[in-house]
Amino acid sequence: MTIKPSISIFGNGRVGGALQNSCDKAGYKIDSVYSRNLCPSSIDELGEVIFLTVQDSEIENLAKKLSSAFDDLSKNIIVHCSGTLSSSILKSLEKKGSKIASFHPLKAITLNEDSLEGIWFDMEGDEGALNVLEKITKDLGANCFEVKPEAKPLLHASAVVSSNYLVSLLKLATDIAETGGIDPDIALKALVPLAESSLENIKKKGFEKALTGPIERGDFTTIQEHLKQLKENPDLLNLYKALGHKTISIAKGLNENQIRDLKQLLD
């Protein structure tokens, strides 16, 4: 394996495109990029590190297609980028001598992404593969950590909550504002900086010290008024209550009476 191994990518979607662009910028030779339906006729067309960036449902079939096409893959590291699946789904390639791994970017990747700098990858698999992936990660200006295969689904669920559900949470916030007659576009423009400041405070201070607002200070009256105003919108009300209960568990400055009263109010 060379210092900067050559790379092939199967799948030309968002993740594949981001890897291609960022690896190219970091000085890696991109030998080939294939769509999910194409398979090279010669192993010489393949890079030393092969990324499978197709959808989860297509990974195993692609792995079997490659293992059927080539008898000896001992010089190749083959990696998929699924957040949920472990490297064991590539066992057909392992039988042909390949080192296998999973390598998942914890980032909401958009089209034409050209940098993965500063993001985190979770990875698991063959030790030799992980050593090479760690080097690639550093060259991309990114970070990585190893995860147990059985922990991947829960890690991915946490990523969904912190990324996809954050979008849903801000939509919830603008919906609540809209029930009060506020233009949702204006509400979003006003609320996004507030959300960004909270995220920055979490990074700097941690959850407990970053928390502000009526639950953190035990402001029973304000929460009571919120619930009253949301009474005609049960979906919004139930989400507000559920998030309120989670917030109580973070607010460490509350006394026992405040915790009891707030929980009763939100039940």
Image (spheres, rainbow, N blue to C red):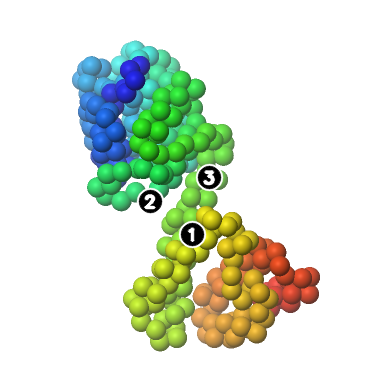
Marks 2,1: beta carbons within 8 A? no
Q: Place residue 192 in its image quadrant.
A: bottom left
Residue under the point 57% across and 82% down: 226
Q: Which mark is residue 200?
A: 1
Residue type, label 3: Leu
Please rate how many residues cluster around mark 3, counting C-alpha atoms within 10 Å: few if below 14, some from 14 to 19, many from 20: some
Residue 247 location, x and y as percent?
62, 66
State yes or no: discs 1 and 3 in contact (Cβ < 8 Å): no
- Name the residue located 36 percent from the left edge and 73 percent from the top edge: 189
Q: Earlier in the sequence, mark 2 or mark 1?
A: 2
Residue in the image at 44% along x and 63% along y? 196
Distance CA(mark 2)–CA(mark 3): 15 Å
> Left of 127 or right of it: where is 264?
right
Where 196 sits versus 231, above or below?
A: above
Disc assigned to residue 108: 2
* 152 or 191, nearer to the observer: 191
Q: Residue furthest right?
A: 256
- The image position of residue 156, as x and y in percent, is 49, 46
Label 2, label 1: how many angstroms apart (C-alpha)?
Answer: 18 Å
Q: Within 10 angstroms of label 2, few (less than 14), some, or many (20 or more) residues?
A: few
Mark 1 neighbour class, 10 Å CA radius: few under 14, some 14 to 19, many 20 or more: few
Disc marking residue 222: none
Q: CA distance from mark 1 to mark 3?
A: 22 Å
